[in-house]
Structure formats: C-alpha cells, structure tokens
Amino acid sequence: MNNYYKVFLGICVLSVLTLVVMLFMGYRAETGPLAVAFFVALAIGIRGTPLKGLAFTVWIFAAVTASMFYPKYFVEIGSFQLKILIVPLMQIIMFGMGTAMSIKDFVGVIKMPKGVFVGMLCQFTIMPFVGFGLAKSFGFPPEIAAGVVLIGSSPCGLASNVMNYIASNNLALAVTLTACATMAAPIMTPFMMKMLAGQMIQISFVDMMLGIIYMVIIPIGAGLMFNHYAHTRFKMSETLKHVIIIAIFIVIWFAISLSGSTGEKLLRIGDLFKNMSITFIIAGFVGWVINYFAKGNTRFLDKIMPIVSMVGIAYIITIITAAGRDNLLAIGITLVFAAIIHNTLGYVFGYWGSRMFGLNKKDCRTIAIEVGLQNGGMASGLALQMGKVATVGLAPAVFGPWMNISGSALANWWRSRPATDDVDQEDAAQVEA
C-alpha cells in the first residue's frame, strides 16, 4: 500500500474518532461533515487494500450519508426537481448494459435449457413471494410494503454478472439469465406486482409494462444496435435484417395510427413502436459513425459505460434517500433488516431450489446470486413513474448498497472454495472402484 492510500485511511480513522467524541458530547446535528468525510476517505483509502472491490459501495454510503444530513441539496436545484433525472439515467444505464451484450447472450437458452428454466422460475417466484411475506410480517405501511414487493419482482441486474464472475461461477449461464429475466420483466414484473401488491396500492399492468419497455427494453435494444455497428465492420446483410425489423415496427405504428381507433392504450402502443424505431435508427447510426471515425478502435466505450452506470446508480440511490428521508428515519432500521433478510433468503432459496432440480453446485451458485441480486435501478424508476419515489422507492434504495456488500462477500467466499461438480465426483468414484 502506498502512502497516498495510507493518508486517506488515516483521515478515516481520525474522522471516526472525532465523530465518536462529538456524539458522546451530544453534538449529533454537527456530525454530518465528519460522517461524510469518513466514508469518502474510506472509499479512497480502501482501494489500496484487498477490499478495494467494495470501494463503489462505500462511495454509495458516502452519498447516502450526505443526502440524509443535507436532503435539500439533493431534492431540487432552484425550481428543478432532481428526481426527474432518475428515469433518463436508468435508460443510460440500460443502454450501457445493451452495449455489453450481444445476441449470443441468448444462445444459452438452447445450450443450457434446464439451467435457464430453473433460474427464471426461481427469479420470479422466490423473491416476489419472500418480499410479500416480509412486507406483511413487518407490518410496513402500504406504499413501503409495495416497494418491498417491487424490488422482489424486479429482474436480476448487471451486478449479478459481476459477482458471478468474481465467484468463478457459470458466467455464460449468469449472462443468459440476466438477459432473459430482463426481457421477461415487462410481463412478469407487472404481473407479480398486480397479484401481490395490488391490495396495497393501485397497480396498472399496462402502465407498468410500458414503463419497463421504455426504461429498460428500448435502451437495451438501442445498446445492442449501437454495439453491433460500433464494434463490427459494416455488413450489408446484417443491416438489411435490422432495416426489415425496424420497418415492421414502423408499419405497425402506421397501421395503428391510420386505423382510426381512438383507444388510448392502442395509441400508446403505436407510439411505442414509433419511438422504438427512431431510437434504434439513431443508435445504429451513431455506432456506425463512431466506428468509421475511430477506424474500428471503439473499445474505449467498454471502459466508459461501466463508470457511467456506477455514477448513475449512486445518483439514483442518493436522490431517493433524500426524497424519503423522513420515512427512512421512521422505519429505516426495520427496512434495512427486511432488506438483509430478503437478500439472504434469495441466496439460500435460489441455491437449494436449484439443487432440488438436480443442477450441479456451480450452476446452483450462479442461480443463487442471480436470484439474490435485483435490478434496484429499474424498481426505483418504476416507483418514480408511479409518483411514489419517496415511499415505494425506499426499499430499492436500501436494497442497493446492501446487495453490493453481501454479493461481494458471497462471491469472494465462493471463489476461495471452488465448487466440485457432482458428476465429476461420481465419475472419479467409479474410476477408483
């Protein structure tokens, strides 16, 4: 560890000691700067230690601490409401996810059908029902309870792929599950919310479905289109396929527009196809332009997008924390406890549920992480679109930081204890016999 990191760790220790003294003397309101300084110094200093993988999580804690002490600076600037940026940021994050994906990520459905089926089954049963059970058991207010169900009904996020990579699990299965769960989210998330949270708050299946498509599916599709033209040479045959797909979207839009129908839902679906077509065209064209001028050297984008995603996630959590500060102060500890239980049971039931279907240990570990780690950003965006970011959005905001801590810990623990394939053990026993 060089002196640079040691200095910040020293500042971290000094900050926490001063903080303890001030709390002991009764100066609670004045401890905000020290609390923020502690987490900022720790986030920088920890990068010089074996725990550097937790630096991002510590940065989130620093941002959350600042928003808890000084919420007014994270709610609005002048008359501009900062929460308005949550959905655009989520779209950027999902676009980044799309740029890191390809159609090959869905091939795993054919190569590993059993693993994908079991993973999808666990994903959209375990977490929603566990969330519902916890919401009822803890007796949360209806909107807070709906947020717990919402985070459980969301698909797995990008963090699950990172954690499975760290754990040396079945990364191909992890990527395929993330892709499939995300594509299924427009149907499964509203369905589970309508079934489990419909008694807590009003849920519109169509509104939530369209919200997920606009916030997640279209940006991912645009990212896929951008990735194709930014990283590969121009191929007329591939372009023709994309033109045909986009043309179908446009034809559907025109058919709906010219049908004379005044149905609001039908017209909204027509607008969906129009916006999808425009977005895909722009994404593909921009990707091609960057590829042309960069002469194919576009790998720098792979380094930029993860940073943008991390900043976006931190921002979303900070804004929601500031908006729901009063609710967090009232039930914060209880909600944190519920999030820990929810996340832990996701790992446990995900692993043993997969074992019940006869999957090997490596695949079971993969599914456990996929089930336990949810797309908190998408849940936060949906809470905003529902107009309940300060209540429904609290559970996703609390779940996010803890998810990174527990996921990192579990991934590193499993990495140090490699899974032994059950089939290999049986074959070795037969050889020895």
Image (spheres, rainbow, N blue to C red):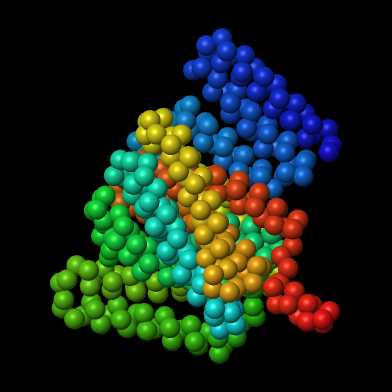
Where residue 44 sits, quadrant-wise, is top right
Residue under the point 54% across and 70% down: 356
Q: Position of residue 205 (x, y in %)?
A: 28, 63
- For residue 421, side relative to residue 357 (left or right): right
In the image, is residue 62 above or below residue 252?
above
Q: Name the quadrant of the C terminus.
A: bottom right
Q: Is residue 106 visible?
A: no
Q: Residue furthest bottom?
A: 237
Please report the residue visible at 39 percent of the width from the left and 37 percent of the height from the top.
Answer: 323
Report the front residue among 359 and 79. 359
Occupied quadrant, residue 49: top right
Left or right of 119, for residue 169: right
| Residue at left offset 40%, top offset 74% | 277
- The tally of labels here is 0
**Is residue 251 placed above or below 217 in the rendered structure?**
below
x then y, percent, for residue 307: 62, 52
Does residue 15 lie above or below 119 as drawn? above
Residue 186: where, in percent of width, then height? 38, 67
Percent position of residue 265, x then y: 22, 68
Q: Residue furthest front?
A: 433
Quarter occupied by the N terminus: top right
Q: Nearer the viewer, residue 249 or 323?
A: 323
Question: Can residue 406 be seen in the rendering of this structure?
Answer: yes
Residue at 74% x, 62% y: name it: 418
